[in-house]
């Protein structure tokens, strides 16, 4: 929340008076200036200082939404990452924003929340706007495509409840682990002896997560 992160946040919110105006300005800046990189492993790592220093504002949800959290905090707005997984399809009608089947093994998703006076914790998800741009159609589109403005408007102040939150923790020391803390806990973790397995290596670390709706 200092250095280049603070300087960037100050530029973004310059002239904005209210918490809501500041929070929205940061959201719109991220949507306009970042992009989703399909080559990023997992959901990314969230090294926002490096992103800003290199000018490479790409990644996946744990990068782009972490950038929102860091900029918001630097602007004086409490904010947090929320780690979880998509469990069913999107009722928005967006193929890219839901789980396509009962197998949700690769449906992990990080979202963000910002605390706004008079509202409490408010959801924001600029990373999913960028996911729509990259994945909703057979070829990447632009922010001007007609499918983007509705989801861009909706994902500031709301998120769809087809997603299950796990936790908000950073730098997690796993119980019984002899290895270093993990930056965040969203993927299964395993260790053999003193070695932690690479949870993002699908050839050597295999698991299945399924989800189904329980109707009353």
Image: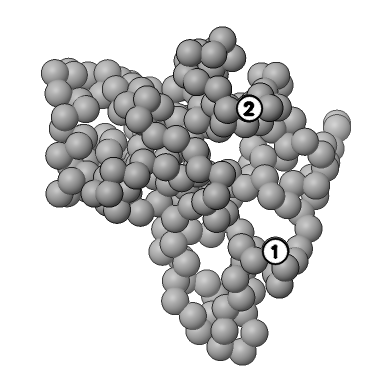
Please report the residue visible at 25 percent of the width from the left and 24 percent of the height from the top: 22
Percent coordinates x, y for residue 185 in the rendering: 53, 59
Q: Quadrant of residue 19?
A: top left
Q: Is residue 4 left or right of residue 88?
A: left
- Are the two marked residues, 1 and 2, in contact with CB atoms closer than 8 angstroms? no
Q: Quadrant of residue 99?
A: top right
Q: Earlier in the sequence, mark 1 or mark 2?
A: 2
Vertical relation: 128 (above or below) 60: above
Vertical relation: 29 (above or below) 144: below
**Callout 1 secondary element:** loop
Q: Is residue 89 left or right of residue 79?
A: right
Please report the residue visible at 32 percent of the width from the left and 26 percent of the height from the top: 29
Disc 2 packing (10 Å; few <14; some 14–19; many ≥20): few
Figure colour scheme: one colour
Along the line of sight, the residue nearer the viewer: 98 or 23: 98
Please report the residue visible at 62 percent of the width from the left and 47 percent of the height from the top: 108
Percent coordinates x, y for residue 86 in the rendering: 67, 40
Point out the residue furthest to the top here: 146
Vertical relation: 199 (above or below) 157: below
Q: Quadrant of residue 211?
A: top right
**Which numbered dot is residue 21?**
none
**Callout 2 secondary element:** loop
Q: Which residue is mark 2?
A: 139
Please report the residue visible at 85 percent of the width from the left and 32 percent of the height from the top: 215
Q: Which residue is mark 1?
A: 202
């Amino acid at each position: 929340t200092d250095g280049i992160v603070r300087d960037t946040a100050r530029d973004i919110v310059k002239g904005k008076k209210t918490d809501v105006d500041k929070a929205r300005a940061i959201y719109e800046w991220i949507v306009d200036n970042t992009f989703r990189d399909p080559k990023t492993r997992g959901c990314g790592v969230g090294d926002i200082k490096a992103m800003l220093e290199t000018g490479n504002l790409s990644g996946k949800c744990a990068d782009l939404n972490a950038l929102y959290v860091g900029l918001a905090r630097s602007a004086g707005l409490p904010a947090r990452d929320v780690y979880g997984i998509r469990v069913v399809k999107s009722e928005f009608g967006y193929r890219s924003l839901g789980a396509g089947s009962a197998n949700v093994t690769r449906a992990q998703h990080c979202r963000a929340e910002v605390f706004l006076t008079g509202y409490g914790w408010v959801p924001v998800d600029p990373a999913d706007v960028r996911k729509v741009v990259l994945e909703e159609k057979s070829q990447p589109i632009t922010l001007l495509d007609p499918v983007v403005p509705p989801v861009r408007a909706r994902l500031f102040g709301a998120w769809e409840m087809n997603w299950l939150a796990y936790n908000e923790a950073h730098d997690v020391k796993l119980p019984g682990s002899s290895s270093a803390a993990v930056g965040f806990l969203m993927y299964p973790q395993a260790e053999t002896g003193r070695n932690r397995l690479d949870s993002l290596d699908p050839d050597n670390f295999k698991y299945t997560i399924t989800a189904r709706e329980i109707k009353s």
